[in-house]
Image (cartoon, helix red, strand yellow):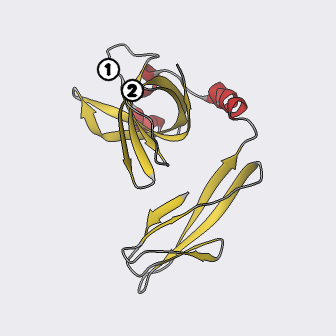
Amino acid sequence: MLAGATERDGLVTVEGRPITVDPSGRFAQLMSVSAIGDTTVSVRASAPGRAPRFFPIRVKRVASLAAEAALFERRAQGSYAAIADATEQKVGWAVVLEGKLTEVKSDGYASSLLLDVDKGCREPPCLVRLALGERTNLAPGTGVTAYGYLAGKSAESVGGRGLPEVRVEFLRGRP
């Protein structure tokens, strides 16, 4: 799903084809990627009186999520302690974090999750904000493994500690 918002009376094209934009500027378009591997989709947004903006969107389709998870784990950091301090200097680090969801919020086609991380937690709770680019029906208490990239510190804090924020590539459930 490609979803977002542009200016009122704006136009959005994907690979040169227009997609429907509602009067408030919001759009949502189901996308299909059939080939395995990396694909870049070009999105162009324009509005009257404004210069157009171009956004390359990277999509990766894999043959096996389990195999992709194993590859991701080899290059990722898996400990809360490794990302909790000096987070801003570690933006872009690959991470694989396991724990239980304590909060799930969905808005439109995106979700914001709060994960209490198990590994490397010296002083519980060890919370991380997960930014997920899809609506989810997961519930608090669900055990998950999150695969993604450290995006910096979340705007919120708990107990005086800032929360690391992770841009999630994919999630896997666990018992």
Mark 1: which secondary structure? loop
**Vertical side of 75 occupied by 81: above or below:** above
45 on left or right of 37: left
Q: What amino acid does circle 1 point to?
A: Pro
- Asked if the residue at tag 2 contacts the one at tag 1, i.e. Cβ–Cβ closer than 8 Å, the answer is no
Near mark 1 (Cα within 10 A), the count class, few <14, some 14-19 or many ≥20, is few
Quarter-of-image position of residue 139: top left
Tell me where residue 18 appears, x and y as whole percent. 58, 77
**As drawn, 50 above or below 141:** below
How many marks do you count on the picture? 2
Image quadrant assignment for residue 169: top right
Location of the N terminus (image quadrant): bottom right
Task: Mark yes or no: residue 90 visible.
Answer: yes
**At numbered mark 2, what does the secondary structure look like: helix, strand or loop?**
helix
Image x and y of residue 48, in percent: 42, 86
Towards the viewer: 50 or 27: 27
Residue 84 tag number: 2
Is 101 or 168 nearer to us in this picture? 101
The residue at the far bottom in this view is: 49
Q: What's the amino acid at mark 2?
A: Ala
User: Where's residue 140, x and y in %?
Assistant: 37, 30
| Residue drawn 41% across the image and 40% down it | 152
Q: Which residue is mark 1?
A: 125
Residue 138: name its quadrant. Answer: top left
173 vs 8, left or right, is: right
Per the rendering, the mark at residue 49 is: none
Label located before the other in sequence (1 or 2):
2
Horizontally, residue 129 falls left or right of residue 132, namely left
Crowd around label 2: few <14 · some 14–19 · many ≥20 (10 Å): many
